[in-house]
Amino acid sequence: ASHKPADALELFGDLPDWWIAGGWAIDLWLGRTTRDHADLDITTLRRSQGAFWNRLADWDLHLGTAPDVVEPWLDRDVVPPPLHAVWCRPTPSSEWAFELLLNDSDETRWLFRREHAVYMPLDDIARTSDDGIPYLVPEIVLLYKAKNIREHDVQDFDIALPSLDDAQRAWLRDAIAVVHLGHPWLERLG
């Protein structure tokens, strides 16, 4: 039973600064489920992480220390940059429930982890679904997905693109141009 955005709302609903990311965020933006989701990505700000580790005190947490490498995270203090991913499950014998991803920010702006010259005002990075679930705007989600372009990332781009307005397309195009020169999505973003 893979976890869904509603599970995140139940767990973190009273905490500030968290949003659904990844493919589920695209579905929340579109208001419908467009594909099967293998996992649930939840994101918060690096500066806000402490409340989440407190909430997950009884959970089994693993820290992403390298691509495709997770190690038991025992000290539970602060995830040191540049590390940013914590895999979370209720018990060591459970399936992974979700990945909690830390986003960089300054006082007023979300900063793209891979390149701080790409940013957005914190007030603009999220929306809330009809059932009260906060999620990252699609242009930020697609910027993260532009790195690896796996099949499901291309699917998400294809399905979200028609719903993006001119400002969203321009932001995403400019952001991808900064971090991924010659990216195949640039042409389609006009």
Image: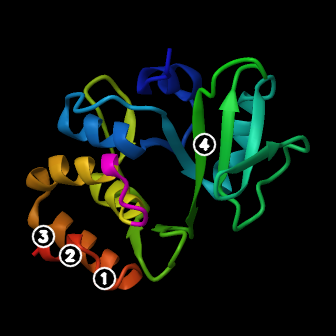
Q: Secondary structure at mark 4?
A: strand
As drawn, the label of residue 100 is 4
- Give the residue type at disc 4: Leu
The residue sitting at the top extreme is 1
- Please give the residue where the numbered disc 3 appears in the rendered image: 188
**Mark 3 residue type:** Arg
**Residue type (three-letter) at the residue carrying disc 2:** Leu
* Disc 3/disc 1 C-alpha distance (Å): 13 Å
Q: Is residue 21 left or right of residue 139?
A: right
What secondary structure is found at the residue carrying circle 2?
helix
> Given contact means CB atoms under 8 Å apart, are the residues at marks 2 and 3 in contact?
yes
Mark 2 neighbour class, 10 Å CA radius: few under 14, some 14 to 19, many 20 or more: some
Separation of marks 4 and 3 at Cα, in angstroms: 31 Å
Count residues near mark 3 (Cα–Cα under 10 Å), then give few for <14, some for 14-19, many for 20+.
few
Mark 2 or mark 4, earlier in chain = 4
Q: Mark 1 or 4 closer to N-term?
A: 4
Residue labelled with disc 1? 177
Marks 1 & 4, CB-CB < 8 Å contact: no
Please tell me the numbered disc located at residue 186.
Answer: 2
